[in-house]
Amino acid sequence: MAELAVLVSRFEEAEQSGMDARAEGVRARKYYDGKQWTEAEKAALAKKKQAAITINRIRRKIDWLLGLEMQTRTDPKAFPRTPKHQQGAQAATDAIRFVCDQQDWDGERSGVWGDMLIEGWGGVEVIHDFRPPMTQPRVVINRYAADRLFWDPHSREADFSDARYKGAVIWSDAEALKEEYPDAADVIDASLSADFGGSGEFEDKPSWQIWSDPKRKRVRMVLMHYIERGVWKWAQFVRAGIVAEGESEYVDEDGDSLCPLIMASAYVGEGGDRHGVIRDMFDPQDEVNKRRSKLLHTLNTRQTAGIKGAVGSVRAMKAELANPDGHVEVDAEAVEAAGQLGMKAFEILPNQDQTAGQFNLLQEAKAELDLMGANSGLAGKDEAGGASGRAILARQQGGLIEIAPLTDRLSHFTREVYRQIWLRIRQFWTEETWVRVTDDERNVRFVGLNQPVTLADRLGQIPPEQAQAFVAQNGLFPGDPRLQQVVAIDNNVEEMDVDILIEEAPDAVTLEGETFEQLVNIATSMPGAVPPDVLIELAPGLRREVKDKLLERQQQQQAQAAQQGQAQAQMAQQGQQIEAQAKQASTAKDAAAAQKLTVEAVAKSIEAQRLAVYGV
């Protein structure tokens, strides 16, 4: 293990070398929060009675990028490396998603993304926690704020993969720290009177003591992960000594030592200079604020010229000009004397050229800021009007190319977090575990991991004929203890061999809206061509519960219509039967009448023949 002096030296090296980057990060965070004027600048403006105006266009840019991450969130998915691991891949997917939901990974990821955009770097720690009364270790994701992280100053990679050490600063109450580490109580007490002697970086927040106990004692502790002879180790130490230390208990797929602290940065400049996207916005934002302030001051300022004595009091004249209904009186003799000299006794000097110049430069500064980050096309604004959803999407995709390096680094960071979550599951979930999985808004199921399968369970999973043959062959009987023997482990996480990927979700909102509009047009022009339930399912913007209610009502209406249709069909069938019977009766009647006529005709013929023969 490393000595305290070595650990302190590494931390102070990281602290000193990162001062400029950290100072820029603090400035970037202030600019995002709208604190864009220094106290000296505001004091100088106050002397000139000029307002310190802040038009915060940086927040809008950063919030759009934050919103982009929120709108394109995706779930992890495990893919099998061999055909026999297909079932295990689905179980692995369910397990990783369960941990992400339990640890609010979406919120933690958004926090890291915000730190990357503003300060320039961020990170989380994927560890495990197991304490009574837990029955199963829990995978934990801890996020560290950007102003608490430090790293090897010789690191150059955006993901810090080449760093020999990295860590975080943790402030804690001395008493709470001694409760957690009772064996290090003397070291913690000694640190209260000691100091790192550094640059003042990583100070406790808040730095002022409002709403706090003046007797409360806080201790700065450093958590450092470092690699030594190919093995990752860790140490928690204060200035007076080491509180706790050990080798990393986390391993990768090959059993090699692994660092649980995962970090990422937005940009890495020359010499390992790490920064966020706001660096390029500092100067244009300052120009917008200062030119807007100067423009307003110029519009409210009147420069005057005149001969001495033209006005009774220059101070009073300036006060009158500052009033919307002000009135300035000029001495008549001074006007006459000035006229004789070919001069004006008093005049207000024009400043339209200065105003126009400030306004034009202000517009240029705004345009420069608008081109950074989320421009109108990238934000999906249809300035011309009438563009189709596909055209808007194409314009957005073209704009996304500009921020692709940023989103790619976020994706790389996310994949590494998913990978380490799965590694923790494989390493520490050794007992039977059930996770709750929500497939969609309506279906909830439970997935068993490391689930023991007894002989009775296995016989119930095969065809009855095979089960009966197996029972007869092995002489099994009801209540046989052999039936409760564990013969296999389903979804054994230790044996699962999978790749963890991110399901990239395209920005489908615009396309869905356009598709829905086309279906509505088809349904309008060709009634009955598109079922109503299809339109309800594809309607963009409707919440799931609203769709369910509409679909349920649609089904009820269809059922009622079907019942009415059946009743009408029965009535129509009965009417057809009655009509057929009437036709049949009429036909029979006509046949009987025809037969009667035939009989009568035959009888008349016979009678005529008889009269012809016998004459009587």
Image: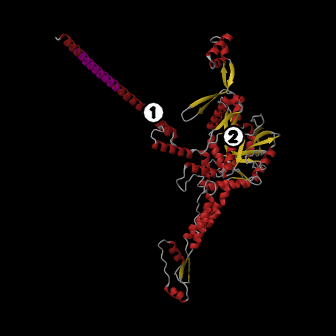
Mark 1 = which residue?
555
- Which residue occupies the foreground of this view, 414 or 607? 607
Amino acid type of the residue tagged 2 in the rendering: Val
Residue reaching furthest to the right: 229
Badge 1 density bin: few <14, some 14–19, many ≥20, Cα 10 Å: few
Which residues are drawn in magenta? 575-603
Tag count in the figure? 2
Mark 2 = which residue?
417
Mark 1 and mark 2 lie on one chain; the one further toward the N terminus is 2
Position of residue 607 relative to residue 120, above or below, is above
Q: CA distance from mark 1 to mark 2?
A: 44 Å
- Which residue occupies the foreground of this view, 67 or 127? 67
Q: Any magenta on residue 592?
A: yes
Colour setting:
secondary structure
Position of residue 369 relative to residue 220, above or below, is below
Q: Picture quarter containing residue 21? A: bottom right
| Residue 488 image position (x, y, % from top left) | 69, 22
Q: Element at badge 1?
A: helix
